[in-house]
Image: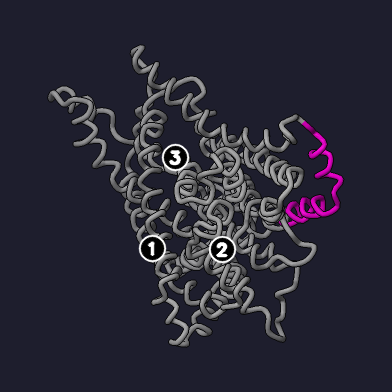
Amino acid sequence: MITSYRSTSKWLAFLPVVVMLTFVVAPALNIFIISLNFESFAILTAQTTQSVVWFTTWQAIISTILVLFFAMPIAAMTANFDFFGRRALISLISVPFILPTVVVGAAFLEILPTSIHHSAFAIIIAHIYFNFGLVVRIISSRWQQINPHLDDVARTLGASRTRLFVTVTLPLLKKSLQSAGLLVFLMCFTSYGVIRILGGPARSTIETEIYFRAMQLGDVSGALVLSILQLVVVGVLVLLTTQFGTRKSAELSQMVFSRIRKPQTSGQIIVIASVALITAVTVVMPLVSVVRRSILIDQQINFSIWQSIFIDEEIFRSLMTSLKFAVFTIIVSTTIGLLSACAVTYGSERYRVLNLLTALPVVISAVTLGLGLIITFDIDPIDWRGAWLMMPIAHCLVAIPIVMRMISPTIRDLPNGLRDASQTLGATTWQMWRTIDLRLIKPALVSAAAIACAVSLGEFGASSFLVRRNNETLPLMISRLLGRPGEIIQAQAYAIATLLIVACAGIIGVVDYFGTEKH
């Protein structure tokens, strides 16, 4: 708690609390209230529902195991060795995670053989690609902080590299692996965009089934029951993830070790170069396939598609809509995330409830959030369902949890000495915050704004419910164009996907630049 700012906490928390109660808690409670019809729960015993739940679960388990398996060698390399291009590689492997899920789906629709389209294998491969960069970052950051002297002692006692890893390194990485695994399982369990593009009619998860029942079958009660089922599962997963994350933070609080070193032998150099090259090619190939497909018509290079996407009135309108929503999301989510982070950091223990409130959009999931907004705000006197603001509000709700958690650690770690000196010199609370806190958290604020932009540009789940005439965003247009026949139409979808890839790569560059600058 920071005494100088304690009295401001109630004002800082006011707007975030109102927004979360209005647009998250009320729709979530509405889902439970409307679904309190026990006859509706009969859907859970249906064979179709059980098949969907089973597929959702086993594909998430397999995807998680394989993500951890493929991420470990890369995490080991980036955590232990300083090599040419290390920072660039870390930035590159982060790109897939912030790509719109429809872009990832489109990339694998192009790069995989037609025979395995709409298969579980295609979905799992796409999930591995989407999540492995996140896991590398989580595990690598923990691995770097393991005291290198533990390795030296183990080797002195005659331990082989394998025994050293199994008996020393792996136990110390256990909580990070558990946290990363739970997070990846959560992402795969609630996967929507990838399933919509790669799953086809035969492969459906709980998320896509909610959309299908609500928007195509008109079975809103069945969709709400599935939403409750998913809320329960995801809520438990988030609690477990938070628990591991808290333990990890406490465990690392006293650790300041760095084990990164230059490769010592030719064998190490060859292995590092091979892993780095394979990783880079793996990340780049799907992206290149998207770019290639955007300029290839009838097996010939043709740039006319790129001209058409800026001339076509419908596509240009979607582009402008996405940009407008992104700007709105940056301003609103960054403001609310900053207010929430400041209220929690500066205030007493009772303000910790904001941590829970701002995490709710993650627990609810974007698809359920979109459904909740539709059924809550379509009744007079608050019939806002057709208002254009509903979609960017949904984008903000999805971005706020990320923004807050990017800003909070920076505010928490600011030195109190600077504030005390400023207060001694007669600075007001506002002057103290503006000249000290704001300047020091600016890099984190810029990074959070960039991620909020990426979230808005790629948001697909809630937008699928809230889309109305003349407010279609680029991910929604990509999905619609991919579902239509015609090589030119398909090429347009891939050209739009290429624009989003370039935007996401630029956003990662901004985040990494300010993250490095901060230190």
N-term mark: 1 or 2 = 1
Magenta region: 302-325
Quarter of the image with the N terminus in it: bottom left
Q: How crowded is mark 1: few (under 14 residues within 10 Å), some or many (20 or more)?
A: some
Give the residue type at disc 3: Arg
Residue in the picture at 51% in, 77% down: 222
Q: Nearer the viewer, residue 414 or 352?
A: 352
Give the residue type at disc 1: Trp
Magenta includes 163?
no
Number of on-image labels: 3
According to the picture, the residue beneath numbered tag 2 turns out to be 366
Place of residue 356 in the rendered image (x, y in percent of width and height, measured from the top left):
46, 66
Q: Residues within 10 Å of mark 3 (few under 14, many from 20)?
A: many
Place of residue 138 in the rendered image (x, y in percent of width and height, measured from the top left):
41, 43
According to the picture, the residue beneath numbered tag 3 turns out to be 137
Disc 3 vs disc 2: which is toward the camera?
2
Magenta includes 320?
yes
Q: How is the image coloured?
A: one colour
According to the picture, the residue beneath numbered tag 1 turns out to be 54
Secondary structure of the magenta portion, mostly? helix
